[in-house]
Image: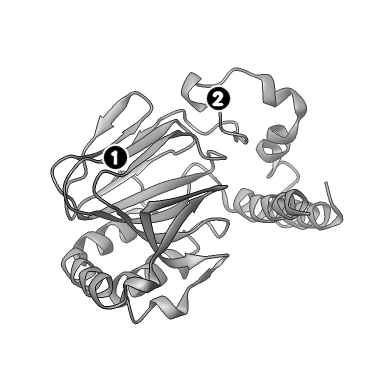
Amino acid sequence: MTPEIDKCFAAVKSDYGADSLHRVEEMLEPRRRSEQRHPLQQAAKWILPGIPQVPWHDPYAYTEILPVVRALEAAHGKIKDDHERAWLQSRERFSDYQHYLVRQRNWQALYLYRDGALVEDAAPLAPTAYDVLKEHAVDTGLICPLLESHLSTLLPGAAIKPHCDLWNFSINLHLAIDIPEGAGIRVADEPREWEEGKCLLFDYSFEHEAWNDANRNRTCLLVDLWHPGTSLPERAALTVLMTEIQKMMAA
């Protein structure tokens, strides 16, 4: 623990009560690292206790998340048009996606939210997605500031290898923008296909992979949201905790 973490935890407990961070503190106990978890969550580093071990979630089931799901789906046509225009006219603004230490050239990203803030330079390229994201995820505090949102394009033949992300207290929302036949995703032991114009929601602390076996691009909008099973005090503490841990790891 660092002074910044200690100060944050004390402030959160003062505002929300002494027991408001008991799950976060339990997660940090060394014994938690060896406790039983779902076999397909083994590679995740941080597992907040009490989060249901459910790989796939119904994107329409959570009152908190539903407004952003509905807004994205309603704007699908405009988001797709914006993306096609940006891909044709501003291809240089897309970058190889870097997943932890691995850079993948056949996975292209246009970032809308990164490093805890909206990427303002992306607004002219993806105005519809940017505005929906700002209104329904950023301004509402629903987006996880530790992570990101980007327009994600898998080139023909691309595959994302099976992996677990770092933790279970955020959740990944996909809006299917342009989906060719032959593109799919697997989370835990259940493969699915994207339905263009619809959202998928899954817990990416479970092992997952994706592929595009088609002869044209597959594009989704990816948004990292707080898991609906987390509380406001936990979100505040986890933001500071993980930011400090990342600083220490980079030092």
Horizontal and vertical percent for residue 142?
47, 59
Horizontal and vertical percent for residue 128?
28, 74
Q: Which mark is residue 20?
A: none
Horizontal and vertical percent for residue 77?
16, 67
Instruction: Give residue 3's quadrant in the image.
Output: bottom right
Instruction: Give residue 217's quadrant in the image.
Output: bottom left
The residue that label 1 is drawn on is 211
Residue at 32%, 51% (x, y): give it: 174
Which numbered disc, 1 or 2, marks the residue that appears first in the sequence?
A: 2
Helix, strand or loop status at disc 1: strand
| Count of number-bearing discs | 2
Residue at 40%, 76% (x, y): give it: 122
The residue that label 2 is drawn on is 42
| Tag 1 near tag 2, CB within 8 Å | no
Crowd around label 1: few <14 · some 14–19 · many ≥20 (10 Å):
some
Amino acid found under the numbered disc labelled 2: Gln
Crowd around label 2: few <14 · some 14–19 · many ≥20 (10 Å):
some
Helix, strand or loop status at disc 2: loop
